[in-house]
Image (spheres, rainbow, N blue to C red):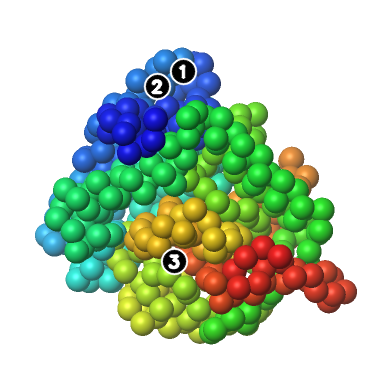
Amino acid sequence: MSEATIPFADRLDRLGEVAVRIGLNLQPGQELVVSAPLEAVALVRRITEHAYRAGASLVTTQYSDDEATLARYRFASDDALDHSAQWMADGIARAYREGAARLAITGSNPTLLNGQDPARVSRASRAASRASREAMEIITRFDTNWTIVAFATTAWSQQVFPELPAEQAQARLWDAIFASSRLEAPDPVIAWQQHNAALHAKAAMLNDRRFHTLHFTGPGTDLRVGLADGHAWAGGSERTTNGIDCNPNIPTEEVFTTPHSHRVSGHVSSTKPLFHQGTLIDDIRVTFEGGRIIESHAGKGEDALRRILETDDGAARLGEVALVPHASPISDTGILFRNTLFDENASSHIALGQAYTKCLFDTEGASPDDLASRGANMSMIHIDWMIGSDKIDLDGLHEDGTATPLMRKGEWV
């Protein structure tokens, strides 16, 4: 049966099953904490059923509402934006510490906050980042199993396909989500197991090479990204520190590792827009020196970019570099999803802020200072933006400077 003939309810159920069995690999007796847009309740219900079938002890969902979020920026006082629900963030961090899995459903309006005062948005963002720092560190250390999946909300669909009536736009976006999430296969679970094996093989190749630096070149880009000492490449399913294999992103096409926070130099231009917390930032151009961004520009959203870089000491340094071939299934759709979960899996990318310390060998017992000395960046943020295209070349450089071609015009050599 082709995906086009599978009823929508069955396709949504497949997404719920993949989220629980492949994304989370939820374990019997484990709690699950879900965050979701209000419109995604149908998917939350499918996920909740599959979680309990997998043996979950409790599923707790926190819903967000775009209109309520927008009301805060329209009507709250400036001082109120410095406040965040620390009690809630502390409870979520405690749940993760005690072994709860985390599942986020993405799909909010990608430009919800366009037109709002960037200074007010920045104040609220800083407060939220401070409150959730412990929970984010648990996630970036892979101390528990987590995943992100998507729901095609009405507002998001209409931004991806503005030329279509609302119902058709949503149907088109759902088709793209289901296809890129490998739900069209006769058995999506087996399809994901095979895809994970391919990504593991690519990561193993890069680990065997032990490159010292990655060199990206192309229009507007001549960037050298030094890699952290003892860095480890990863991709597809990953094992958490509590011994559970999970797929952090559904879908995923990347292999990624930890850059050295003080060994990045040169300039780079974005190849896709960044939609961050409801704000559009496009045509990003930055210059690195000694690992830090020393000059930044954006054709749209420059003030928002500047405020991101000022979040804390680590916000202007890199915490991730990821490689994705241009001819990936998501890129081949030709769709600008306006959502990082999808757009980052259509293009090689870098991330400002917190490093995934999972992407380092021999970290057991290492202190934060030990990890920092090896190059792992620390920050309250982790924001991916895209630098790959069919015009970008990539070489792997060894410590003696010898170069190995890795990608040409965006494709693996």
286 relative to 211, above or below: below
Q: Residue furthest left?
A: 75
Identify the residue position indicated by label 3 in the image: 311
Query: Which amino acid type corresponds to the residue marked 1 in the rendered image?
Result: Ala
Q: CA distance from mark 3 to mark 2?
A: 38 Å
The 10 Å Cα crowd at callout 1, few under 14, some 14 to 19, many 20 or more, is some
Marks 1 and 2 close (CB-CB < 8 Å): yes
Identify the residue position indicated by label 1 in the image: 54
Marks 3 and 1 close (CB-CB < 8 Å): no
Q: Residue at x 23, y 48 (%)?
A: 170
In this rendering, does residue 90 appear at all?
no
Residue 403 location, quadrant: bottom right
Residue 302 x %, y %: 36, 79
Identify the residue position indicated by label 2 in the image: 50
Frontmost of labels 3 and 2 is 2
Residue 115 location, quadrant: bottom left
Of 350 and 370, nearer the camera is 350
